[in-house]
Amino acid sequence: MGGALSGCLFARHALLPQGWRRDVLLEWDAAGDLTAVTENAAAPLGAEVAEYVLPGMVNLHSHAFQRALGGMTEVAGDGPDSFWTWRDLMYRFARHITPEQMETIAAQLFAECLRHGYTAVCEFHYLQRDMAGALYARPAETAERVLAAARLSGIGLTMLPVLYSHAGFGAQALKEEQARFRTDADDVLRIVEALAPRRGGQVEVGFAPHSLRAAGVAQIREVAQALPAGRPIHIHIAEQQGEVRQCLDYSGRRPVQYLYDQIDIDARWCLVHATHVQPDEVALMAASGAVAGLCPTTEANLGDGLFPLAEFIAAGGRFGVGSDSHVSQSPVEELRWLEYGQRLQRQQRNVAATPEQRHVGDYLWQAALQGGAQASGRKLGALAPGCRADLLVLDDAHVNLCGVAIADVLGSVLFCGNDKLVRDVLCGGRWQVRDGRHVAQDAIAAAYKRTLAQLRAL
């Protein structure tokens, strides 16, 4: 979708890896990669000109099908509600989704993500089997549907087929409602192999052990060793206190401690949530180079808790953000609440900063972008030659940017009101959003509405 690939854009102000720079000419080739980023340039005759240009954000954790569940679980039960009661509702919903519906839901989500400023997504994909729990004739059927949605929307995708074998620590048998998620090491490697021809500039393929309670360490090692070098690996870990207690009962260690004791964790790993970690675990994560995958809106929605961000930053840790269950599709909201959660917990302001970068908005955007790029396994993360041509043009006519000093632009984007300030989005060298609208917005939304009507009639 979108316009011609090769092209250029002249930015009066662009956020480069070294910070904001003036009069920057950005050029990209037919493969969708940036070929030149020239500072103090002159605008070529006829070139499109933008006032403020940012690198597009990476959404490092997504369960696309859960987008269709939005708003349906916000009703109190008879007893205290928690992640675990929400999970039961999600399981019941997931049982009815067809591959065709999966594709329309994912396309709607990805179009929304693009409009809000995400240009790449890591799909933690565990809805693998049919409604009876059997593998499809093509084992990668549902993953291929998500890839088709990514092509339609134009977003970059890292597909992470999920290893999901057990209902709990100690290889507990899966429950009936988990039958659609069941995979063993061979299943995952078969899906990874089937998706290999799809890899390219816009697509990478890794894998994701769902969690230590759903995948045994021997299985995780088997797939990790068989996976080609450099491919990303993501895992849910220490999201809930109940999970921590179960891990302690099973192994005598907390989840992050147990993971690091059993498996060689390095920079290709993304540890999603890691909400309940102690200082020694924070130090382990930071020293290993793994990315902490933080999803503040989902973690708040599910009552998970707060990650110790300040301590992780102080230890030199890398982090990114994701929309997870998609109660929000906005990186602005994730980053805002990542900071606000810390402020509430610590009763202080401007937590996400360093002596080298005291502007919280700039620090959050750049740090989350770098962590997300690492977790994606793709050529992302900066407006720099060799990276994908993924960029956002801000709405410089909006009142929130009127007269703002360049050093305060990202502070205004993240912490001033709730209007969306992303006007145009280029992804892989194609314009996918213009004037706030996705190029296929109407057709994608129409298909999504039909799917919602079908699912909500059940």
Image: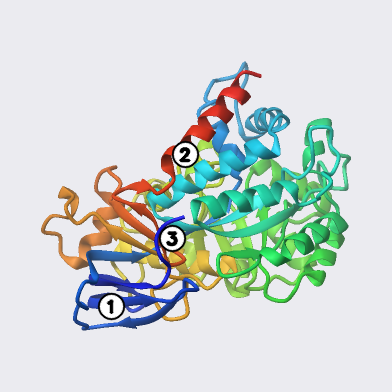
Question: Callout 1, which amino acid?
Answer: Leu
Residue denoted by label 1: 25
- Tell me which residue sits at (78%, 31%) in the image: 177
Q: Position of residue 365 (x, y in %)?
A: 38, 63
Vertical arrangement, residue 438 with respect to residue 411, above or below? above
- Tell me which residue sits at (81%, 41%) in the image: 167
Total marks shown come to 3
Residue denoted by label 2: 443
Residue denoted by label 3: 57
Per the model, the C-alpha gap separating discs 2 and 1 is 34 Å
Tell me if 119 is positioned left or right of 194 in this view.
left
- Quarter of the picture holding the C terminus: top right
Tag 1 secondary structure: strand
Toward the viewer: 333 or 254? 333
- Tell me which residue sits at (62%, 16%) in the image: 78
- Tell me which residue sits at (68%, 70%) in the image: 231
Please say whether residue 239 is visible from this viewpoint.
Answer: yes
